[in-house]
Image (tube, coloured by chain):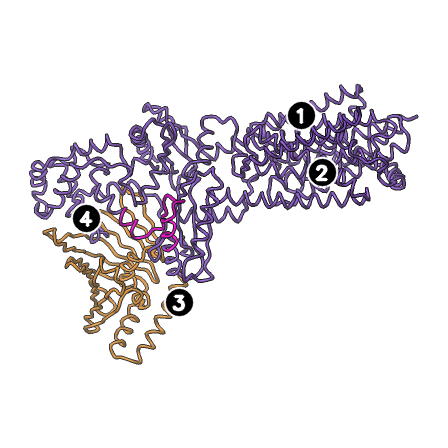
Chain colours: A purple, B orange
C-alpha cells in the first residue's frame, strides 16, 4: 500500500511538471512596456496603450550615423536608405534625400489649388485676384523677392505660400551634403518605419538587426563610422535583451550562491539536489500558471523567478535541518503551512492589481510557493534515502544560541532604530514616492539622452498634447480633422495654442477638395477676371498663361487620395496621424504650446476642450499623455498601497486565527513591522524615492519574514533544547539563502529588479535579527 | 562665434599678406579690405530696385542698413512692406508684421548664408568670409572701385550669378545682385556715416 502511494505521488508530480514544461514551450515571452500598461484601461488610457503598442510612433526607428566627415556620413545615409527601401521589412525610409524633397515640392506646388486653405470663390473673383496678385507683387519687394519671383508666373495668387504657412513652426531637420543631419551637424539622421507592429518585438528585433547588417555591409565604409538607433521599438528590443541577459545571469549566480551555501551546511550533493527540487518545481509551475492566466509571460516576471529560489529553498532547509520537526512533526508541518498561507495572503492582494506586471508577479509567487511547499511536503520525504542526514550541527547551534542570548539584550537598540527610522520617514514625508514611469523603465539614462538628441534633430513631433477622435471611414476622419482644425486655428490666433498638426493639412477630405475646385472659375471666367484684376498692375495677362492652365487642370482632376502622397515625406505624416484600425480610423492631432508663453510649454487643455465642445465637437478628446501616464502610475501606486495594506491585514488575521493568541500574533508581527520601517527609512535616507516595486519588496519582506517569526514563535513553545537549536540553525541558513539571492537581484541593472532586491535583501535579514531579539526574550519569560 | 570670426579675420589677413607678395591686383584688394575693416560701425539708408522680367516696372523698396563690427548687420525695410532682417554672428532673425518671427542658423542654410555674407563680409572687410563663397575681382580706382563677387558653388547659381559692389574709399555705395535669367536687384546706399 505504502509503496503504491509513493509511486502515485511521484507519478502525479512528474506528470504535472511535464504538463507545465509543455505549456511553457508554447508560451509567448514579452518584454515591452505592456507590463506597465493598465489591464482595464479607461478610454483615454486605451488610446495611450494603443499608440505605444501599434501606433506609427511605435514603428519608427530613428537612426544616426556618426564618425567620418559630413560628406561620408551623407553617402552612408544614402546607401543605407537605398538598401532599407528595398527591404520589405520597412514601409518607408526618409533621410532628406533630394528625390523626396522633389516629390514634396511637386506635391505641394502641383496641388496647390486643392491644398491651399485660402482658395475660395471670393479670392478668385476679379477683386480677389487683384488683391492676391497685388500682395504677391509687394512680397517681391522683400528680401526673398528674387526667389519668390519664380512662383509668380504660375502661382500669382501665392497659394503655395499660403499652404506652406500652415506648417510654419514645425521644425525641420537640418540638411547637410544632401542628407538630414543633427543640429550640430555631427550625425547624419534617418527615419525608418517598420512594417511589423510595434507590439511584435520579434519583428522589431529583426528589423533593427537588418538595419545594423545593411550598415555594416555598405562598401568602402570607414571603420570609424558608427550607427546609433533609438525609438520605442529599439527600446523594446534592447530592454528585452537586457532583461533576458540579466535574468539568466542573476538566476545562474543565485543558484551557484545558494548551492555553495547549502553544500557548506549539508556536505552532501544528494541533499543539495533534493533541496533544489521544490525550487525547480515551483518556478516551472509559476511560469505555467502565469502563461495560463495571462496568455503571455513578461520577462520581468522571470526576473522574479530568481527571488523564488531564495524563498522556496527555505522549505527544504527547514525539512532537512529540523529533521521534520524531530519529535514534533505535526507542529513542524503546521508552522510550514502557516508560513505558506501568510505568504499567499500577502501575494493574493497583488492578484487584484490593475498593473499587469504586479498581478503576474502575484500569480507567479502564489503558484510557485504552493508547488514548492507541496513538493517539500509530499515528494521530498518519499525521495529522501533512509539514513541520510545533515551532518551534526549541534556545535554551531550552541554557538548560535549563545549569540542569541546576548542579542536579547539589544532590545533598546530596536527602540533606538525605530525612533531613527520614524524620524527619517517623517523627514521625507512629502517626498516618499516616485511617480515617474522612467523610474521603472529598464532604459538607461544614456539611451534616453540619445533618444532625445535624435528626436530633436529630426524635429519629430512632441506627442505630449493631442486632440484625438475616431471616425468610421477615411473621408469622415478627414472631415472631422478639418472641423477640429478650424477651431484649433482660432485658438492659435488667440495664442492659447502655438500650433497643431493634422492629416487634413496634407490630404484634405474629398468634400473640401471638391469645394475648392468649385470655387475656381472656368477658363473663360478666369481669363476675363484676370484681365480685370491686372488693370493697373505692372503685370501682363499673357505672362500668366501657366496660371490659367494649372487652375483648369486643378478643376478637372480627381481629388487627391493617400496614394498620391507616395514618395513624399507627407505620406509618413498622414500614416502617423490618420491610423487605420480594424473597425475604424483613429485621428491624432498633436498640439504645440505657444513658444515663449508665460505658462512655459504647457497648454491649457480645459480651454481647448471647451472651444471644441462649443463647436459641437465633443467627440474630440484632448489629452496630455504625460499627465495620463503619471495618472496611471499614481493609480497603480495608490491601488498597491491599499492592496498591500489589505495583504498585511489578511496576514495578521490569518495569524490570529491560527495562533489563537493576540500576544503570540504580536510577537510574530512586531519584528516584521520593525524590519519594514527600518528598510524604508534606510532607502529614503540614501536618497532613493520609493517606487511601486519597493512597496512590493516590503510586502515580500513581510511574506518571507513571517516564516522566521513563526518558527521563532514555535521554538518558544515547549520543546527540547536540541530541537530549538536545530530550528534556529535552519532559520539562519534559510535567511542567508534569501538575503543572498535577493542581494544579487539588488545588483541588477534593471531598476524593477534592483528595487526589489535592495528592499528584500536587507529587509529579510532585519526581520530575522529582530525576530531573534524579540522572540528570545519572550521565550525566556514564557518558559518559567 | 565672435572668436571664430576673429580667427577668420586673422586668417584673412595672413592670406592677404601671403598673396600680397605675388600680384599687384591683390595689393589693391587687400588694401580695400583693410580700409573697410577699419570702420567699426555705420548707418545708411537704402533704396533697392528689383528688375524682374515678367513685371513691367522695377519694384522698389527702401529702408535702413546698419552695421556694427565685427558681425552685426541690420536691414530694416520700411516700404512697401515693413520687414526686418537682423544678422548677428550665425543667427539670422526675420520679422514681418503679422507673421511668426523666424530665426535661422546660417550654418544650416548655406545659400542664405552666401547671400547675406556678401554684404556683411564686404562691410566688415572680411576677405576670408567672402572667399568662402565667391571669387573676388577688384577693378577701378580707390575713389571709384568695383568689387565683383562670383559664386564658386554651382548650387548658388539658382539664386545669384554675380554680385557687384561699388564704392569710394571706405564707403560702400551700391550693391547689385544679378541672376542668370537677367533679373537683378540694385541697391543704392545713399548715406553711410562712419563713426
Of the numbered discs 1 and 4, the one sitting upstream in the chain is 4
Of the numbered discs 4 and 2, the one sitting upstream in the chain is 4
Label 3: which secondary element: helix
Give the alpha-carbon distance from disc 2 to disc 3, as whole Å: 67 Å
How many residues crowd around disc 1 within 10 Å: few (fewer than 14), some, or many (20 or more)? many
Give the alpha-carbon distance from disc 2 to disc 1, as whole Å: 21 Å
Mark identifier at residue B7: 3
Give the alpha-carbon distance from disc 4 to disc 3, as whole Å: 40 Å
- Say whether marks 2 and 3 touch (CB < 8 Å): no
**Which residue position is annotated with label 4?**
A151
Horizontally, residue A279 falls left or right of residue A153, namely right
Label 1: which secondary element: helix
Residue B184 is a magenta residue: no
**Which residue position is annotated with label 2?**
A310
**Which residue position is annotated with label 1?**
A647
Q: Position of residue A376 (x, y in %)?
A: 75, 31
Horizontally, residue A513 falls left or right of residue A655, namely left
* Chain ID, mark 3: B
* Chain ID, mark 1: A
Give me the residue at 18% from left, 60% from top: B178
Location of the N terminus of chain A (image quadrant): top right
Amino acid at each position: 500500500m505504502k509503496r503504491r502511494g509513493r509511486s502515485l505521488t511521484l507519478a502525479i508530480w512528474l506528470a504535472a511538471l511535464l504538463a507545465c514544461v509543455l505549456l511553457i514551450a508554447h508560451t509567448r515571452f514579452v518584454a515591452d512596456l505592456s507590463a506597465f500598461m493598465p489591464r482595464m484601461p479607461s478610454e483615454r488610457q486605451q488610446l495611450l496603450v494603443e499608440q505605444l503598442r501599434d501606433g506609427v510612433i511605435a514603428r519608427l526607428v530613428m537612426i544616426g550615423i556618426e564618425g567620418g566627415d559630413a560628406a561620408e556620413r551623407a553617402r552612408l545615409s544614402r546607401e543605407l536608405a537605398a538598401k532599407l527601401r528595398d527591404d520589405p521589412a520597412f514601409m518607408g525610409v526618409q533621410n532628406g534625400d533630394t528625390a523626396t524633397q522633389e516629390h514634396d515640392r511637386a506635391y505641394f506646388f502641383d496641388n496647390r489649388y486643392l491644398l491651399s486653405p485660402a482658395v475660395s470663390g471670393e479670392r478668385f473673383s476679379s477683386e480677389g485676384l487683384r488683391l492676391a496678385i497685388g500682395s504677391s507683387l509687394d512680397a517681391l519687394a522683400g528680401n526673398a523677392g528674387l526667389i519668390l519671383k519664380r512662383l509668380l508666373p504660375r502661382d500669382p495668387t501665392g497659394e503655395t505660400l499660403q499652404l506652406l504657412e500652415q506648417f510654419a513652426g514645425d521644425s525641420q531637420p537640418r540638411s547637410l551634403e544632401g542628407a538630414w543631419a543633427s543640429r550640430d551637424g555631427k550625425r547624419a539622421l534617418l527615419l525608418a518605419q517598420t512594417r511589423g507592429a510595434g507590439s511584435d518585438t520579434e519583428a522589431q528585433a529583426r528589423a533593427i538587426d537588418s538595419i545594423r547588417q545593411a550598415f555594416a555591409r555598405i562598401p568602402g565604409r570607414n571603420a570609424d563610422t558608427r550607427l546609433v538607433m533609438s525609438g520605442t521599438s529599439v527600446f523594446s528590443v534592447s530592454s528585452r535583451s537586457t532583461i533576458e541577459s540579466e535574468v539568466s545571469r542573476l538566476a545562474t549566480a543565485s543558484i551557484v550562491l545558494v548551492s555553495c551555501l547549502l553544500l557548506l551546511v549539508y556536505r552532501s550533493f544528494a541533499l543539495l539536489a533534493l533541496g533544489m527540487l521544490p525550487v525547480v518545481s515551483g518556478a516551472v509551475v509559476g511560469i505555467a500558471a502565469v502563461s495560463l492566466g495571462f496568455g503571455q509571460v513578461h520577462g520581468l516576471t522571470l526576473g522574479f523567478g530568481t527571488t523564488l529560489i531564495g524563498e522556496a529553498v527555505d522549505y527544504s532547509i527547514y525539512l532537512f535541518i529540523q529533521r521534520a520537526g524531530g519529535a514534533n512533526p505535526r507542529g513542524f508541518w503546521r508552522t510550514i503551512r502557516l508560513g505558506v498561507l501568510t505568504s499567499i495572503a500577502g501575494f493574493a492582494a497583488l492578484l487584484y492589481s490593475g498593473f499587469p506586471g504586479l498581478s503576474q508577479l502575484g500569480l507567479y509567487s502564489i503558484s510557485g510557493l504552493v508547488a514548492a511547499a507541496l513538493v517539500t511536503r509530499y515528494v521530498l520525504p518519499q525521495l529522501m534515502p533512509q539514513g541520510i542526514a545533515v551532518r551534526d550541527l549541534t556545535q554551531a547551534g550552541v554557538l548560535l544560541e549563545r549569540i542569541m542570548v546576548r542579542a536579547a539584550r539589544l532590545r533598546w537598540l530596536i527602540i533606538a532604530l525605530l525612533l531613527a527610522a520614524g524620524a527619517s520617514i517623517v523627514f521625507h514625508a512629502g517626498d516618499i514616492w516616485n511617480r515617474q514611469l522612467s523610474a521603472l523603465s529598464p532604459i538607461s539614462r544614456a539611451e534616453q539622452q540619445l533618444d532625445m538628441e535624435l528626436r530633436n534633430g529630426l524635429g519629430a513631433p512632441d506627442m505630449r498634447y493631442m486632440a484625438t477622435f475616431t471616425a468610421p471611414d477615411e473621408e469622415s476622419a478627414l472631415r472631422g480633422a478639418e472641423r477640429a482644425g478650424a477651431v484649433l486655428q482660432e485658438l492659435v490666433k488667440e495664442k492659447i495654442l502655438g500650433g497643431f498638426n493634422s492629416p487634413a493639412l496634407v490630404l484634405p477630405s474629398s468634400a473640401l477638395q471638391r469645394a475648392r475646385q468649385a470655387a475656381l472659375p472656368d477658363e473663360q471666367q478666369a481669363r476675363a477676371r484676370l484681365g480685370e484684376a491686372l488693370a493697373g498692375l505692372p503685370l501682363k495677362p499673357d505672362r500668366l498663361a501657366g496660371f490659367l492652365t494649372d487652375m483648369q487642370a486643378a478643376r478637372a482632376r480627381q481629388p487627391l487620395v493617400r496614394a498620391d502622397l507616395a514618395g513624399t515625406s507627407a505620406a509618413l505624416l498622414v500614416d502617423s496621424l490618420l491610423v487605420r484600425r480594424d473597425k475604424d480610423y483613429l485621428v491624432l492631432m498633436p498640439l504645440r504650446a505657444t513658444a515663449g508663453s508665460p505658462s512655459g510649454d504647457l497648454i491649457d487643455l480645459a480651454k481647448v476642450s471647451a472651444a471644441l465642445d462649443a463647436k459641437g465637437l465633443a467627440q474630440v478628446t484632448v489629452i496630455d499623455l504625460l499627465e495620463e501616464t503619471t495618472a496611471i502610475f499614481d493609480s497603480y501606486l495608490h491601488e498597491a498601497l491599499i492592496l498591500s495594506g489589505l495583504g498585511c491585514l489578511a496576514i495578521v488575521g490569518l495569524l490570529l486565527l491560527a495562533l489563537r493568541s493576540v500576544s503570540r500574533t504580536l510577537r510574530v508581527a512586531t519584528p516584521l513591522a520593525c524590519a519594514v520601517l527600518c528598510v524604508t527609512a534606510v532607502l529614503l535616507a540614501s536618497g532613493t524615492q520609493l517606487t511601486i516595486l519597493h512597496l512590493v519588496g516590503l510586502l515580500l519582506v513581510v511574506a518571507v519574514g513571517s516564516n522566521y517569526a513563526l518558527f521563532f514563535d514555535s521554538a518558544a513553545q515547549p520543546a527540547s533544547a536540541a530541537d530549538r537549536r536545530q530550528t534556529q540553525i535552519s532559520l539562519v541558513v534559510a535567511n542567508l539563502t534569501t538575503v543572498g539571492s535577493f542581494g544579487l537581484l539588488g545588483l541588477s541593472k534593471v531598476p524593477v529588479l534592483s528595487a526589489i532586491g535592495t528592499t528584500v535583501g536587507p529587509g529579510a535579514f532585519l526581520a530575522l535579527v529582530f525576530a531573534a531579539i524579540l522572540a528570545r526574550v519572550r521565550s525566556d519569560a514564557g518558559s518559567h | 562665434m565672435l572668436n571664430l570670426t576673429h580667427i577668420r579675420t586673422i586668417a584673412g589677413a595672413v592670406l592677404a599678406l601671403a598673396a600680397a607678395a605675388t600680384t599687384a591686383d591683390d595689393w589693391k584688394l587687400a588694401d580695400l579690405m583693410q580700409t573697410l575693416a577699419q570702420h567699426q560701425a555705420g548707418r545708411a539708408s537704402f533704396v533697392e530696385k528689383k528688375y524682374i522680367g515678367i513685371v513691367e516696372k522695377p519694384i522698389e523698396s527702401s529702408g535702413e542698413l546698419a552695421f556694427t563690427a565685427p558681425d552685426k548687420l541690420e536691414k530694416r525695410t520700411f516700404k512697401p512692406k515693413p520687414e526686418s532682417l537682423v544678422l548677428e554672428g550665425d543667427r539670422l532673425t526675420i520679422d514681418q508684421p503679422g507673421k511668426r518671427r523666424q530665426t535661422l542658423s546660417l550654418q544650416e542654410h548655406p545659400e542664405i548664408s552666401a547671400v547675406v555674407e556678401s554684404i556683411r563680409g564686404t562691410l566688415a572687410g572680411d576677405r576670408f568670409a567672402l572667399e568662402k563663397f565667391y571669387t573676388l575681382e577688384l577693378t577701378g580706382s580707390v575713389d571709384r572701385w568695383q568689387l565683383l563677387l562670383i559664386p564658386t558653388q554651382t548650387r548658388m547659381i539658382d539664386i545669384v550669378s554675380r554680385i557687384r559692389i561699388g564704392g569710394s574709399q571706405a564707403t560702400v555705395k551700391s550693391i547689385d545682385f544679378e541672376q542668370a535669367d537677367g533679373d537683378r536687384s540694385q541697391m543704392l546706399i545713399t548715406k553711410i556715416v562712419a563713426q
